[in-house]
Image (spheres, rainbow, N blue to C red):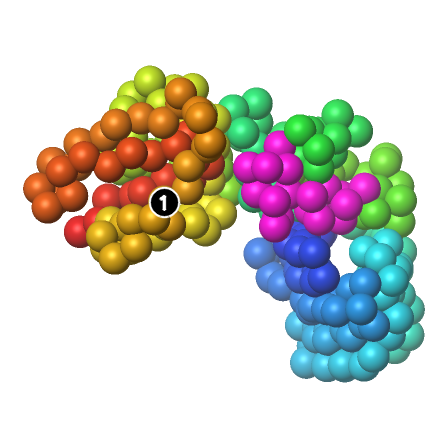
Amino acid sequence: MKVLVINAGSSSLKYQLIEMDTQDVVAKGLCERIGIDGRISHKTESGYKTEYDVSFPTHKEAFEELVKLLTEGENKVVESISEIKAIGHRVLHGSEKYKASTIVTDELIEDIGVKFKDLGPLHNPPQAVAMAACQEVFGKETPMVAVFDTSFHQTCPKKLICSVFLMNTMKNIPSVAMASTELPTVSSPRDILKSPEKIPKEPNSSSATSVTVLPFPQLKTAKFATLPWVLPLSMVS
């Protein structure tokens, strides 16, 4: 059984076609500069390689070019896309709603692209766009599964997810509880010490929490607004 694996970004689309019976990578490649101009690099298990410029106005055209490479010419690896029995999509953040790999539906695409866009603004919206484009090209009858980065984080012990937030903050801020992988605005206590004025705050907000950071007595007490990021132990050691 052949499965296509997709890792899409705002202007790129990485892919691998895997023969699941043997775990062999039949073909893989990269569509890049989507929405700018376009370029694709592609290689197969047999050693065939190609790279060329091609117009990619949207993710849909990238998927269409990928299908051509997989199904046409002397170096095709499948006779038709019907041989691809499933497609997996890497997705950054599923909030608390999606805790495991989930079948792609219109509701899921809406959730990732709209409802949960603030949990991963650089990743979730384009990944939702890519899933919708993939459905257009391969058809909704092809099973598609979203695999979430945060599924891993939800299995981590709480003590490894955060260090400076109070538990009531952890429980009430989904992006904190789910360990968003978006880059923090303030990356470490060292940054706070150097530039305390850069700590994000919500004007006239009562949501700021006073947190005592025990491993850093020099910090004493720092005020954090409710932020969509986590300060892992590894960052403060």
Residue 231 picture location, percent across and down: 32, 42
User: Is 25 drawn above or below residue 165 in the view shown?
Assistant: below
Q: Is residue 97 left or right of residue 3?
A: left
Residue 237 picture location, percent across and down: 17, 51
Which segment is the magenta one?
Answer: 116-132
User: Is 234 drawn above or below residue 143 in the view shown?
Assistant: below
Element assignment for label 1: loop
Question: Which residue is the extreme one toward the left?
Answer: 217
User: Is 102 drawn above or below residue 4 in the view shown?
Assistant: above
Majority secondary structure of magenta residues: helix
Question: Which residue is the extreme one toward the front?
Answer: 204
Which residue is at a point 44% across and 26% down the rendered structure image?
204
Front residue of 196/17: it is 196
Count of numbered marks: 1
Q: Which residue is mark 1?
A: 199
Residue 107 quadrant: top right
Neighbours of disc 1 within 10 Å: few (<14), some (14-19), many (20+): some
Which residue is at a point 57% across and 27% down the rendered structure image?
98
User: Is 218 drawn above or below residue 222 in the view shown?
Assistant: below
Residue 162 picture location, percent across and down: 29, 36
